[in-house]
Image: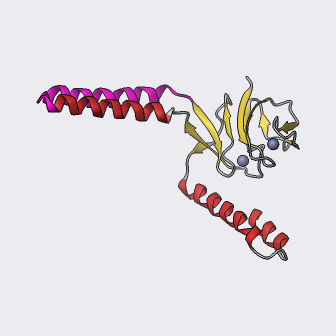
Amino acid sequence: MVTQIRFACPQCEQTDLQSLSAQDTKLGCSHCGAEWAIPTGAIKDDRVLRCVVCPSQELYLRKDFPQRLGLAIVVAGFTASCVTWYYHQVLLTFFVLFAAALVDVILYAFVSNVLTCYRCHAEYRGTQESDHVEFNLEVHERHRQQRARLKEQPDESESGNDRSRSEGFA
Ligand SMILES: [Zn+2]
Ligand SMILES: [Zn+2]
């Protein structure tokens, strides 16, 4: 099984889609040609153990839910229920709302998981699910603040940039 990875290139920031296997030692960007080494042990037996794009070791599982479709179902259900409500079809109104919610729940149950990097938001599909856990707000917040700190740096003075950058990765 080959893992599909969707990531933003660290160099040109364009989104790229690549396939990844345990034998690969390098990952490259098809837009700008940038290449970097995949950390050893990052992929083991079809399982992605850490991010191969950025230095982050933390990944989380989330449902690969088509959010637009999910929202469209809810909106359609709501619109239909307004019509039935207007015609005083109370039972039908509840039925329509219930059906829309049910379709969403069924859809949610059947979509597969996608492994996502907290830091660079690279997405891994088709990987064996390992011991990664579901989204954790605390970890997300830590990575978000770390990113914000890294972003602020170019505005700071050029001197001492290296020092604060190494702190950022710590
Ligand atoms: Zn690139
Ligand atoms: Zn990453």
Look at the image and tell me in which quarter the N terminus lies.
top right
Rendering coords of residue 141 (x, y %) = 58, 59
Q: Main secondary structure of the magenta part?
A: helix
Q: Which residues are magenta?
A: 86-112
Look at the image and tell me in which quarter the C terminus lies.
bottom right
Q: Residue furthest top?
A: 1
Rendering coords of residue 6 (x, y %) = 70, 36
* Residue 76 visible to an observer of this rendering: yes
> Where, by quadrant of the figure, is residue 61 drawn?
top right
- Front residue of 102/138: it is 102
Rendering coords of residue 10 (x, y %) = 78, 48
In the displayed structure, would residue 129 be above or below residue 161? above
Along the horizontal axis of the image, is 144 left or right of 75? right
> Where, by quadrant of the figure, is residue 45 drawn?
top right
Residue 111 part of the magenta-drawn span:
yes
Applied colour scheme: secondary structure
Residue at image location 51% in from the left, 32% down from the top: 66
- Front residue of 99/40: it is 99
Residue at image location 49% in from the left, 25% down from the top: 110
Rendering coords of residue 136 (x, y %) = 55, 51
Along the horizontal axis of the image, is 35 left or right of 91? right
Residue at image location 74% in from the left, 25% down from the top: 2
* Residue 49 visible to an observer of this rendering: no
Residue 118 part of the magenta-drawn span:
no
Residue at image location 81% in from the left, 37% down from the top: 31
